[in-house]
Image: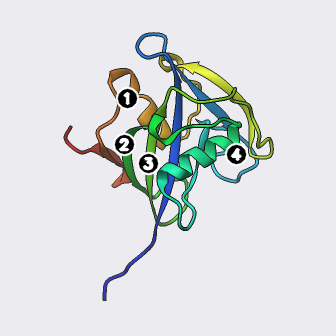
Amino acid sequence: MIDRFQVVPAAYVVLRRQAGPGSQVLLQLRRGTGYMDEHWACAAAGHVESGESVLDTACREAREELGITIDPTDLRPLCAMHRTAEAGWRGQRVDFFFECSRWSGAPRLLEADKAAELRWFDLDALPTPVVPHELFVLETLAEGGPAPVVTFGFDDRESTAPR
């Protein structure tokens, strides 16, 4: 018998100002969530809900967490990440990372019970600590971004698919 499990999908939105040198990303400082509290993370992210596409999830999370409106056509796919065995949880995740440089409204912290701060950071001066699997993606942005499909947490090493 095959041991089957459920994979939990999530969407991450990397809000980015300006491309190239001087590029900045918007991060939130997690607090009160029980997962990676006191770590910096993408400003908008969350689990896909039943019947919802990953694109709808990305737009919904940006609206709920930051009060901004994103058109799904403004989401640029960065990568799909298959990850496991991180921070003591069991199971596996599939994370879809998107970059977005166009939105309506001014990003502001709307979920103060889950985040303590919201701040823009230069890509070459990211804060510490950053949630490890998100840092893995953020650090690739200066060089053009990650491979389309990446893995994280398997056999205590990160690997990427060929570009």
Answer above or below: position of 154 versus 8: above
Q: Nearer the viewer, mark 4 or mark 3?
A: 4
Is disc 1 surrounded by few (<14), some (14 to 19) or many (20+) residues within 10 Å?
Answer: some
Q: Earlier in the sequence, mark 4 or mark 1?
A: 4
Q: Earlier in the sequence, mark 4 or mark 3?
A: 4
Q: Nearer the viewer, mark 2 or mark 4?
A: 4
Q: Are marks 3 and 2 in contact (CB under 8 Å)?
A: yes
Is disc 2 surrounded by few (<14), some (14 to 19) or many (20+) residues within 10 Å?
Answer: some
Residue with the mark numbered 4: 64
Q: Is residue 62 left or right of residue 16?
A: right
Residue type at mark 3 is Phe
- Label 2's element? strand
Q: Is residue 141 left or right of residue 64?
A: left
Residue 71 is situated, as x and y percent measured from the top left of the image, at 53, 38
Residue with the mark numbered 2: 79
Answer above or below: position of 42 versus 86: above
**Spatial distance from mark 1 to mark 2, Cα to Cα?**
11 Å
Q: Earlier in the sequence, mark 1 or mark 2?
A: 2
Q: Is residue 56 left or right of residue 144?
A: right
Instruction: Name which residue lies at 32% across and 46% down.
Output: 150
**Spatial distance from mark 2 to mark 4, Cα to Cα?**
23 Å
Residue 9 is situated, as x and y percent measured from the top left of the image, at 48, 59
Residue type at mark 2 is Cys
Q: Earlier in the sequence, mark 3 or mark 2?
A: 2
- Residue 96 badge: 3
Instruction: Name which residue lies at 66% across and 42% down.
Output: 63
Question: Based on the displayed image, in which of its 4 quarters is residue 37 positioned?
Answer: top right
